[in-house]
Amino acid sequence: MGVNFKVLALSALATISHASPLLYPRATDSNVTYVFTNPNGLNFTQMNTTLPNVTIFATGGTIAGSSADNTATTGYKAGAVGIQTLIDAVPEMLNVANVAGVQVTNVGSPDITSDILLRLSKQINEVVCNDPTMAGAVVTHGTDTLEESAFFLDATVNCRKPVVIVGAMRPSTAISADGPLNLLQSVTVATSPKARDRGALIVMNDRIVSAFYASKTNANTVDTFKAIEMGNLGEVVSNKPYFFYPPVKPTGKTEVDI
């Protein structure tokens, strides 16, 4: 009989959450200190009352990577570009939502720690779940450990709103970088009422994938995050999310209150 290690991992989360301290509103990672702003102090790039509000929580990774060589898809520096630069690079997002950026940390995903994850989850719960004016959350993340972080957020962010995790396989300086479109599509999905009640989602390369089932399948190609059949929830076509079926909770899936 096969073992579902993701399901088994849920039993360990409660222990971890009580053992690890909460490290906000101030956090220090990679010798850089970021100050977390409260919901009323979020710095929105614009405020259009006809559009929904989305907060992007940035953690670094390839999507924020940089290289002096625009043909380099390896050997670049991950987590080199700040969240406001990523937002400014995709002005089309401002046609979709009012966007605020929170720089949680700026590291490669192998350097994401349990303390960072706990802080991130609690910030999402506070800023997005507890604020009725927020439509959803987007988390930018490196792809090496993205599926593990997405699974953690799926288990610990306890609200109906969309939480979308996004990364990139090419750094922001590369020719045909995939990060900008991935980020635009993630913000779009986070604003969609049809994305509610589905747990955490991974949106990359036009795919909408359940974090509960997702796996990274290739270290180099852009079409890397996939899932078994029930985990493929939909697609993004011409920047419109299309879901294959209504929200449903997998048998045996539970949440952890941290």
Image: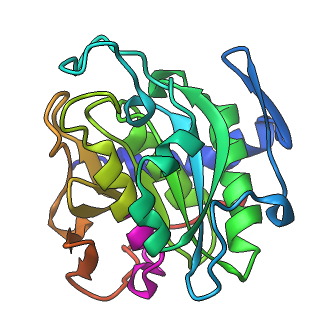
From what the image shows, is residue 6 above or below residue 156?
above
Residue found at x 85% / y 66%: 40
Residue 248 colored magenta?
no
Residue found at x 49% / y 68%: 94
Residue found at x 44% / y 64%: 93
Residue 201 seen anywhere in this rendered image of the structure: no
35 relative to 7 in the view: left or right: right
Q: Nearer the viewer, residue 138 or 153?
A: 138
Q: Nearer the viewer, residue 22 or 79?
A: 79
The part of the image, by quadrant, that contains residue 47 is bottom right
Q: Position of residue 97 (x, y in %)?
A: 52, 73
Residue 192 colored magenta?
yes
Task: State the extent of the magenta-drawn residues as a range.
Answer: 186-199
From what the image shows, is residue 72 above or below residue 209?
above
Q: Nearer the viewer, residue 246 or 228?
A: 246
Q: Position of residue 148 (x, y in %)?
A: 43, 41
77 relative to 74 in the view: left or right: right
From what the image shows, is residue 73 above or below residue 75?
below
The part of the image, by quadrant, that contains residue 245 is bottom left
191 relative to 144 in the view: left or right: right
From what the image shows, is residue 200 above or below residue 122?
below
Quarter of the picture containing the C terminus is: bottom right
Q: Position of residue 107 (x, y in %)?
A: 54, 24
Q: Nearer the viewer, residue 11 or 108?
A: 108
176 relative to 24 in the view: left or right: left
Asked which colour scheme the image uses, the reply is: rainbow
How many numbered markers are drawn?
0
Residue found at x 56% / y 76%: 161
The part of the image, by quadrant, that contains residue 172 is top left
